[in-house]
Amino acid sequence: MRKKLEPTDKTSDTYDVAERAALCINALTGATNPLADHELYFWACFFRNPVAMRNNIDDWCQTKFMEALPLLRIASGSRARLEVDEVWHRVTLKSIGPDGLFYLPLTGRPWGRGGGCYPQGKPVACADGKLRGTKDPAVAQFSHPFLNARQFNALIVYSLRDRNSFWTDLMRKRVARMAELIAYRDDFCFWLDVGYEPGTPWKPGATGELPSGMDVNYVTGMLSYCAGKYHRLTGDQQAATLGEKTARFVIRHGGYFGSGGEFQVDAHFHAHTAILIHLLEFAAATGDRDTLEFVRKSYEWAKTPAAGGSDTIGAFPELAHPSYNVYESCEIADMIGLALKLSKAGVGDYYNDAERWIRNHFAESQLREEQVPLIYHLSGKQPPTPVAENETAWRVAERNVGAFAGWSRANDWAALKSNSIQHCCTGNAARTLYWIWLEALRFNDGDLRVNLLLNRASREADVYSFIPCQGKVEIKIKAACKAVYVHAPGWVKAGSPRMKAAVDGKAVRARWEDRYLALGPAQAGQRVTVELPIAERTVKETIGAVDYTLVIKGDTVVSIDPPGRNLPLYLRDHYRSNEPRYVEVERFLSDTVVEY
């Protein structure tokens, strides 16, 4: 169902989750190779002439796109390039073997044999019992724990959306095969960083030194996520046991976290936060309070200066170190996801963290149309470079609008002059966009809870946010509510009499419940208005060993100094005005909400 807003019912031009989801779909479907079953172009480089995208082994990150795309269609209603969805469904089914595992083809994809990050150089256990590498032409296709775990997520999304046992049958086979290939020790288990050919007889050893480091923890932790989701969906006990044993390995034996959840020195930030999301999903599905508490402690540590990020703007470094000043979008997406899911699980109230980071570095990390001319300007300054066989230079900037920065700085979208986008960041951030849409507004048992003060439409209520231009939020009630609760933003103290509410212009008496302003019942057709104080302040902060001056209005950065050089961020003079810009939009009201 689509509804175009009436001209008199305009919305302010502030952060709109559905609009950002539709923008992201442009990149999810546009940054693909139509001559190769719409395979993802993993890399995009703006600091070359011409601007180009490139296929290589890292294109397996398409599994993240396949997970996020149907979710963002639910949030936005966008039907752009539906043919990509159809091709990906067909490719998915062709790539799943009789054992339920997802296999990555190498024959006919020469770029898949080398020149990438992961799983480049990993051994592959072959059907003849030998171990070979992906560069060996004898290896025509292979599976890998990471590929299977991340692609498993797409199957879960399809199953939740379609309510079709076909997908759960595929997942059941995969869980059984993964249980055969995993290594067991005592009361825990872990996945070795090894690929598999179809029909391999290889079995992991149950003895020897325990593996450690990023790879084994990353892939093992991801199995916890899959197991938790699948267990919640089906009640499968084998999946619950796998999740429990893999979580125990990561927390107690993997050597990747300290006892208080601290990351290892100079460790990859995303490799830790992604594991935390995996553990959180398992713990929430099974009611494991100890694991939930571990995730909470680690999340709290990740916000400290020791981890190297900026809690103010939500810029978290590629490597967890105070002086590291390059930020992947993966990290900020993970931290927002953790904030939302910890809050949903009742472990703490971190909605203020999420909203502050969404409004700042997360919003600024998403490529927008107005940046396209700057990209081609950057490219024009570079010497000509031939376009290779595995590359394309056709409308690259336009096709990546909606993607997320691979490496940014606090003031600049493009920090590195090698590759500007690594689309693992787009895939992770796209999934987080859905989580933002899902958690921004909740209607349960007649209670309406507005958790994030962002523009958001639903069948029960529409939220119109004027923040940061004005300290005002309007809620158009569309279904009778027993009670309406509005979460106070971070700069407003709980219990403050300066946060006020009215219904149809008439002031109402409200009470505080923790961080929520409880407004009582509301009827369909009424309009609830919440007003709160908002003003600018100047903050000086060192982010990644660079001193910045931030002008902040509410929780939104409206100016940063020094400014960026390549694709500058926080060009937000319009937010400093007390009168917002208005736009007319199409609002999509989905019949389907996937609890993911």
Image (tube, rainbow, N blue to C red):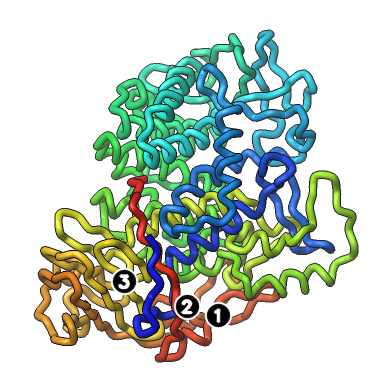
Mark 3, other Cα within 10 Å: few <14 / some 14–19 / many ≥20: many
Disc 2 and disc 3: Cα gap in Å? 22 Å
Residue topped by disc 2: 557
Which quadrant: the N terminus?
bottom left
Q: Position of residue 79 (x, y in %)?
A: 52, 55
Residue topped by disc 3: 463
Any part of residue 467 in sight: no
- The residue drawn where x is 77% and y is 27% is 135
Which residue is more in the foreground, 276 or 431?
431
Task: Tell me if 475 is positioned left or right of 22 in this view.
Answer: left
Task: Tell me if 588 is positioned left or right of 234 in this view.
Answer: right
Q: Position of residue 201 (x, y in %)?
A: 59, 9
Give the answer, above or below, for where 299 lies relative to 117. Answer: below
Q: Label 3 amino acid?
A: Val
Badge 1 marks a residue whose secondary structure is: strand
Q: Position of residue 176 (x, y in %)?
A: 43, 18
- The residue drawn where x is 36% and y is 31% is 230
Q: Label 1 amino acid?
A: Ile
Residue topped by disc 1: 560
